[in-house]
Image (spheres, helix red, strand yellow):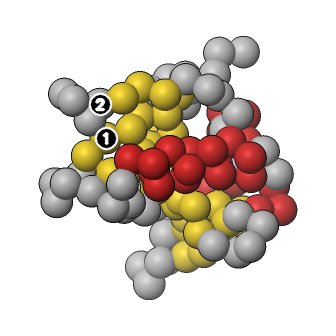
Amino acid sequence: MALGWYELKLANDGQFMFNLKAANSQVILTSELYKTRAAAENGIASVQKNGGDESNFEFRVTKSDQPYFILKAKNHQEIGRSQYYSSQDSAKNGVKSVINNAATTVIKDLTQA
């Protein structure tokens, strides 16, 4: 099975962030904003370490009743979150995709683009 990749990039305000993408190029997890590249790279390492364990995911619902999930490290700090889904089953499939792709070591650096 083909694995996805991480895209490291700059946000509009110059901070660093990353997305985990599935093999079909869909974004399956988005990080918080980081002040430094090193902090964002540590965030990727944390997803690689914690993203394969289903117990590290927490399901939530927006005020408009759209399900999503967050990935937490063992210290309960949020590492990343998903898009909003149309159903709980879709959100569960999103978690499965993160579990399947989190261990990838492919990092595409888009900070120079």
Q: Is residue 14 above or below residue 96?
A: below
Q: Which residue is mark 1?
A: 9
Crowd tier of the residue under label 1, counting other residues whose Cα lies within 10 Å: few below 14, some 14–19, many 20 or above:
many
Q: Position of residue 84 (x, y in %)?
A: 46, 61
Task: List x then y, in percent, for residue 11.
Answer: 24, 52
Where, by quadrant of the figure, is residue 68 drawn? Answer: bottom right
Instruction: Report the residue at 71% width, 64% height from top.
Output: 73
Using residue 74 as the reference point, say whether residue 104 is left or right of it: left
Give the x, y percent position of residue 57: 72, 62
Identity of the amino acid at label 2? Leu
Q: Is residue 34 visible?
A: yes
Q: CA distance from mark 2 to mark 1?
A: 5 Å
Choose between 8 and 94: the one closer to the eye.
8
Q: Nearer the viewer, residue 66 or 32?
A: 32
**Relative to residue 96, is residue 113 depicted above or below?**
above
In the image, what residue type sits under mark 1? Lys
> Going 56% across and 45% down the picture, which residue do you hit?
44
Say if mark 2 contacts mark 1, CB within 8 Å.
yes
89 relative position to 37: left or right: right
Residue 90 visible here: no
Quarter of the N terminus within the rendering: top right
Residue furthest bottom as drawn: 63
Upstream in sequence: badge 2 or badge 1: 1
Mark 2 surroundings: few (<14), some (14-19) or many (≥20) residues within 10 A: few
Image coordinates of residue 4 in percent, x first then y, are: 57, 26
Residue picked out by circle 2: 110
The secondary structure type at the circle numbered 2 is: loop
| Quarter location, residue 110 | top left
